[in-house]
Amino acid sequence: MNRDRLSRHLLIAFLAALTLYVVGYWFIESRRTVDAPWQTAFTVDADHRLTLEISEPSLKLGPVVIQFAAPVTNAPLSRTEMAFNQPRPVPFDVPVGQCIFQDTTFLPGTVVLHVGGVDIQMLPRALTIVSNEFPWHGTQAIEVQADGSSRRLR
């Protein structure tokens, strides 16, 4: 009789733990992906000038267009779009640079790119280029000089 009670209690405890795990996993996963990932577009034009467009549609961040004054070398003329939605080991190559940090645990997360000789950090609260912080204010354009300094164009 005692053995049947123990088996029943263990089964109830196991089912309760399993239910809690499944519900907890579902809740955390749904919160993790409620926002969209960072969307980027790398464009190299005929003059070998790099333009990087960054946006995050679900939080209505951007688009921000970053124009690099210095021409990029060894870059084919192209437009490449990327979304940073899946974790990957860093660093990894992106067009005309590298992604040196990526945390997509909760989207949109944090992404740091080393592009055109400067570090660009995408955070939900602000965009950082080298040490200059630009709050998200809808559509804007930023120019990055050859020395790494940056300024807002519009």
Image (tube, rainbow, N blue to C red):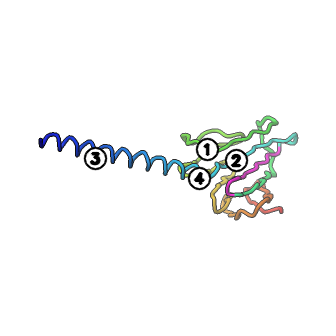
Label 3 packing within 10 angstroms: few (<14), some (14-19), many (20+): few
Residue assigned mark 1: 85
CB within 8 Å, label 1 to label 4: no
Kindly check if marks 2 and 3 are in contact, taking CB atoms under 8 A apart as contact: no
Task: Count neighbours of disc 1 (C-alpha within 10 A) and say few if under 14, some if 14 to 19, many if 20 or more.
Answer: some
Q: Residue at x 70, y 47 (%)?
A: 39
Residue position for label 3: 13
**Which stretch did the figure color magenta?**
49-59
Residue type marked 1 = Asn
Q: Label 2 sits on what residue type?
A: Gln
> In which image quadrant can residue 41 be found?
top right
Question: Which residue was labeled with disc 4?
Answer: 109
Q: Circle 1 sits in a helix, a strand or a loop, which is it?
A: loop
Mark closest to the chain's N terminus, 3 or 4: 3
Amino acid residing under circle 4: Gly
Pick whichever, 92 or 122, lies toward us: 122
Given the current orientation, which residue lies at the most extreme right position?
Answer: 46
Name the N-terminal-most of marks 2 and 1.
2
* Dominant secondary-structure state across the stretch colored magenta: strand
Could one spot residue 103 in this view of the protein?
no
Residue 142, visible in the rendered structure: yes
Rendered-image quadrant of the C terminus: bottom right
Q: Is residue 9 magenta?
A: no
Residue 43 screen position, x and y as percent: 79, 43
Spatial CA span between label 2 and label 3: 44 Å
Disc 3 vs disc 1: which is toward the camera?
A: 3
Q: Position of residue 134 (x, y in %)?
A: 71, 63
